[in-house]
């Protein structure tokens, strides 16, 4: 049994539970275009010009990350998705890019790394949980293979590690 087949079978019970259908369906949707990460950054910024500058930097960095992943890395691999429009039990947008790596997993990891730099602990735990749910939602809704998620996590971590020192040197 392949890694992706095992992952698909592992998540199948979640696809039968109303609560998980709601949680992962919503997580997949708010992960579209990194909406959850832009909103999170700007909510965190309320009341502080320094945090507003950080939120703007996060949004700009997320735009750059999206271009690198969706117009660069995905074009190299051109992997087919496990389903064309996801599992019928979920109402999710049909992606226009290839499957590997997962853009949701990459942007979630990327955003979590930058948010951890911005906020520190204990909020870091929240960012990690949010990123994990958004990333795994893509396997649950059957838009990605599990290996796409792993590839996205690695891609997002590398790009996040590059972005933090750049952002830090610009806005402090």
Image (spheres, helix red, strand yellow):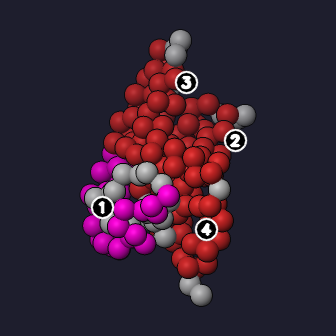
Q: Which mark is residue 109?
A: none
In the image, farthest residue toward the bottom: 1
SS at mark 4? helix
Question: Which callout, 4 or 2, points at the residue further toward the start of the chain?
Answer: 4
Q: Residue 27 placed where, x, y %? A: 53, 46
Q: Earlier in the sequence, mark 4 or mark 1?
A: 4
Residue 86 is covered by the magenta coloring: yes
Q: Give the labeled residue for mark 1.
A: 97
Task: Tell me whether the residue at label 4 lies in contact with that at label 3, contact meaning CB atoms closer than 8 angstroms.
Answer: no
Q: Is residue 70 magenta?
A: yes
Determine the CA span between mark 4 and mark 2: 26 Å
Q: Which residue is mark 3?
A: 44
Badge 1 crowding class, 10 Å Cα cut-off, few under 14, some 14 to 19, many 20 or more, is: some
Mark toward the viewer: 4 or 3: 4
Residue 16: x and y, percent?
62, 61
Q: Is residue 87 left or right of residue 22?
A: left
Residue farthest to the right, as pictured: 122
In primary-sequence order, the first of circles 2 and 1 is 1
Q: Which residues are magenta?
A: 64-89
Of circles 4 and 2, the one toward us is: 4
Residue at horizontal 28 percent and vertical 59 percent from the top: 96
Q: CA distance from mark 4 to mark 1?
A: 24 Å
User: Which numbered mark, 1 or 3, is in the foreground of this view?
Assistant: 1
* Most foreground residue, 48 or 100: 100
Residue 44 higher or lower than 63, as above or below: above
Q: Closer to the camera, 101 or 14?
A: 14
Marks 1 and 3, how far apart in space? Answer: 31 Å
Residues at marks 2 and 1, CA–CA distance in whole angstroms:
30 Å
Q: Tell me the mark number nearer the camera, choosing from 2 and 1.
A: 1
Crowd tier of the residue under label 2, counting other residues whose Cα lies within 10 Å: few below 14, some 14–19, many 20 or above: few
- Whether residue 26 is visible, yes or no, is yes
Q: Which residue is mark 2?
A: 125
């Amino acid at each position: 049994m392949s890694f992706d087949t095992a992952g698909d079978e592992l998540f199948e019970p979640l696809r039968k539970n109303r609560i998980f259908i709601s949680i992962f369906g919503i997580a997949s949707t708010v992960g579209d275009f990194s909406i959850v990460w832009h909103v999170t950054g700007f909510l965190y910024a309320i009341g502080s010009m320094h945090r507003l500058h950080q939120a703007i930097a996060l949004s700009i960095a997320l735009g750059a990350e999206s271009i690198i992943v969706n117009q660069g890395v995905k074009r190299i691999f051109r992997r087919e998705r496990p389903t064309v429009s996801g599992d019928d039990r979920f109402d999710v947008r049909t992606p226009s890019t290839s499957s590997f790596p997962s853009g949701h997993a990459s942007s979630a990891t990327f955003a979590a790394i930058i948010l951890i730099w911005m906020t520190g602990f204990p909020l870091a735990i929240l960012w990690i949980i949010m990123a994990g749910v958004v990333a795994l939602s893509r396997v649950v809704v059957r838009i990605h293979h599990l290996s796409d998620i792993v590839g996205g996590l690695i891609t997002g971590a590398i790009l996040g590690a590059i972005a933090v020192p750049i952002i830090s040197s610009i806005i402090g």
